[in-house]
């Protein structure tokens, strides 16, 4: 393989190391924030980022894709931990999900992403965005259920400041400056949040955040302490059927999100390299197995960090690996600094992520595309809000399939009838693919042809005509004599050749 097209090459070290630093700065608040939104230990988000950044990047065939905890799994993780009753049992489900992904990779199921309608995928992402917003608003305003505090002015100030900083930082006109281009706004928001909370101690003590409103990562006094922070799965739950249901759900959603993200990464790749999808499923599966074994959250390839990687000039997978190493160093040696980060800062980051996923313009765009796109989209969004991700997607898929079948039912042939002065000849031209789905509409149209008509049935455009449809056509031709209907076939296969009569 040409070195410039290789997913890993030391030739681009000068590009990949700075890009890896940028990805780390983007990933750190997201790893913590997504763990927060998922109801998982904050340390679990970092573990997932480390395993995804180092191990999955090394095993994957993608040059630019970055793997870590994903906003798309927050609902599943949150509901899964609650449903199973303990985080250790949930980790067992993560390990099983990884095994399923590896099996899918060996079964060459990497094409599954192509079979999900975009309306359902967009509906899933919009639903996740709405859930993120609903879950993070209480954190952003400082609501503390246990103490009965409805809001905390310090939390509101920090969250509002964080949102303002990120929005200003992302203004297109500022991207021409290196500081705004390569340093993510989320990191600046976190730094300002820490400074504000420290300033409150001196100038406004009533606004100082409660200890429960700050990041709380375990601090290791030694390497042995650091190793002991990792959590093992509860394998005694092997007879719990809920574990297997959750594992299948995680495997399906994580695989789908990873395949969609790597496809997007390939489109952003300046070298236009193509990621082998089956290898990606295996890499993601191994990553989830390892992450589950050491206490981490499930992971996927994630488009936000991948986009940051491309924008920062990353050329090979070394940038993703370097970002994973930086996450490892930060949690091992700088936990005291990370523990000063206000949770309202992370909530602000997630609120904006949620808005980008579920912005109003997306709903308008889907509506303009017509009911065939909008109905599956909006049903997916609503169903996920009132059930769960897998049930919502399943319902959205069923509605989308209904519209696909209805469209095929309507577009099975073209009907033309000459003017009476020309003899009133009816010409029915079959479409490219005529399957059993079209059987009903063709049979109905033929039954409505008036006695004494002349009919030409032409298959010149058809690449495939189903046996069921051929039966209807030949039965119509045989029975037409009784109605004084003249029937002529053009480019229609012989029934005997198809049926073997």
Image (cartoon, helix red, strand yellow):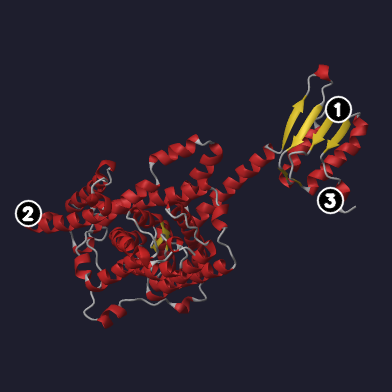
Give the secondary structure at mark 3. Answer: helix
Q: In the rendered image, which residue does mark 2 sit on?
A: 203
Of 351 and 13, nearer the camera is 13
Image height of 296 relative to 482, above or below? below
Q: Is residue 329 visible?
A: yes
Image height of 427 relative to 107, above or below? above
- The answer to which quarter of the image holds residue 463 is top right
Sort mark 2 into few (<14), some (14-19) or many (20+) by Cα contacts within 10 Å: few
Image coordinates for residue 232, horizontal then vertical, percent: 39, 77
Image coordinates for residue 480, horizontal then vertical, percent: 89, 34
Q: In the rendered image, which residue does mark 3 sit on?
A: 498
- Image depth: mark 2 or mark 3 in front: 3
Sort mark 1 into few (<14), some (14-19) or many (20+) by Cα contacts within 10 Å: some
Of 342 and 7, nearer the camera is 7
Q: Are marks 3 and 1 in contact (CB under 8 Å)?
A: no
Image height of 122 relative to 424, above or below? below
Residue found at the very far right of the displayed protein: 482
Q: Earlier in the sequence, mark 3 or mark 1?
A: 1
Of 316 and 250, nearer the camera is 316
Image height of 102 relative to 159, above or below? below
- The answer to which quarter of the image holds residue 261 is bottom left
- Image depth: mark 2 or mark 1 in front: 1
The disc placed on residue 454 is 1
**Rendered residue at 19%/66% (across/down):** 337
Q: Are marks 2 and 3 in contact (CB under 8 Å)?
A: no
**Rendered residue at 35%/46% (across/down):** 355
Q: Earlier in the sequence, mark 2 or mark 3?
A: 2
Q: Is residue 388 visible?
A: no
Of 171 and 352, nearer the camera is 171
> Separation of disc 2 and disc 1 at Cα?
93 Å
């Amino acid at each position: 393989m040409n070195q410039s097209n290789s997913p890993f090459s030391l030739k681009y070290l000068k590009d990949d190391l700075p890009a890896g630093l940028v990805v780390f700065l983007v990933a750190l608040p997201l790893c913590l924030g997504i763990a927060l939104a998922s109801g998982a230990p904050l340390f679990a988000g970092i573990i997932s980022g480390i395993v995804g950044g180092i191990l999955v990047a090394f095993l994957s065939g993608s040059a630019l894709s970055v793997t870590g905890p994903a906003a798309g799994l927050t609902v599943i993780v949150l509901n899964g931990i609650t449903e199973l009753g303990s985080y250790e049992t949930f980790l067992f489900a993560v390990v099983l999900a990884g095994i399923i992904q590896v099996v899918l990779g060996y079964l060459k199921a990497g094409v599954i992403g192509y079979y999900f309608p975009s309306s359902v995928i967009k509906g899933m992402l919009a639903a996740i965005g709405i859930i993120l917003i609903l879950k993070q608003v209480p954190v952003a305003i400082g609501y503390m259920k246990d103490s009965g505090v409805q809001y905390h002015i310090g939390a509101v100030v920090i969250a509002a400041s964080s949102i303002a900083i990120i929005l200003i930082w992302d203004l297109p006109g500022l991207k021409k400056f290196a500081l705004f281009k390569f340093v993510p706004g989320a990191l600046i928001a976190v730094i300002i949040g820490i400074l504000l909370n420290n300033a409150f101690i001196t100038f406004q003590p009533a606004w100082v955040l409660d200890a429960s409103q700050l990041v709380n990562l375990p601090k290791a006094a030694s390497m042995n302490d650091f190793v002991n922070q990792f959590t093992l799965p509860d394998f005694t739950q092997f007879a719990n059927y809920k574990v297997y249901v959750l594992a299948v759900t995680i495997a399906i959603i994580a695989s789908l999100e990873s395949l969609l993200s790597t496809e997007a990464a390939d489109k952003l790749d300046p070298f236009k390299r193509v990621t082998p999808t089956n290898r990606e499923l295996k890499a993601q599966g191994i990553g989830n197995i390892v992450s589950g074994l050491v206490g981490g959250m499930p992971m996927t390839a994630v488009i936000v960090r991948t986009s940051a990687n491309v924008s920062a000039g990353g050329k090979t997978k070394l940038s993703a690996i370097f970002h994973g190493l930086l996450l490892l160093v930060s949690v091992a040696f700088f936990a005291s600094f990370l523990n000063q980060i206000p949770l309202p800062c992370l909530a602000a980051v997630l609120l904006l992520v949620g808005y980008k996923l579920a912005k109003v313009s997306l709903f308008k765009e889907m509506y303009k595309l017509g009911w065939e796109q909008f109905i599956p989209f909006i049903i997916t969004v609503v169903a996920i809000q009132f059930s769960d991700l897998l049930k919502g997607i399943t319902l959205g898929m069923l509605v989308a399939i209904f519209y696909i079948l209805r469209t095929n039912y309507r577009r099975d042939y073209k009907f033309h009838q000459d003017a009476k002065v020309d003899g009133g000849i009816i010409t029915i031209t079959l479409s490219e693919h005529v399957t059993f789905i079209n059987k009903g509409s063709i049979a109905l149209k033929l039954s409505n042809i008036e006695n004494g008509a002349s009919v030409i049935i032409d298959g010149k455009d058809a690449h495939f005509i189903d046996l069921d449809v051929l039966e209807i056509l030949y039965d119509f031709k045989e029975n037409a004599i009784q109605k004084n209907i003249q029937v002529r076939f053009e480019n229609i296969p012989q029934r005997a050749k198809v049926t073997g009569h």
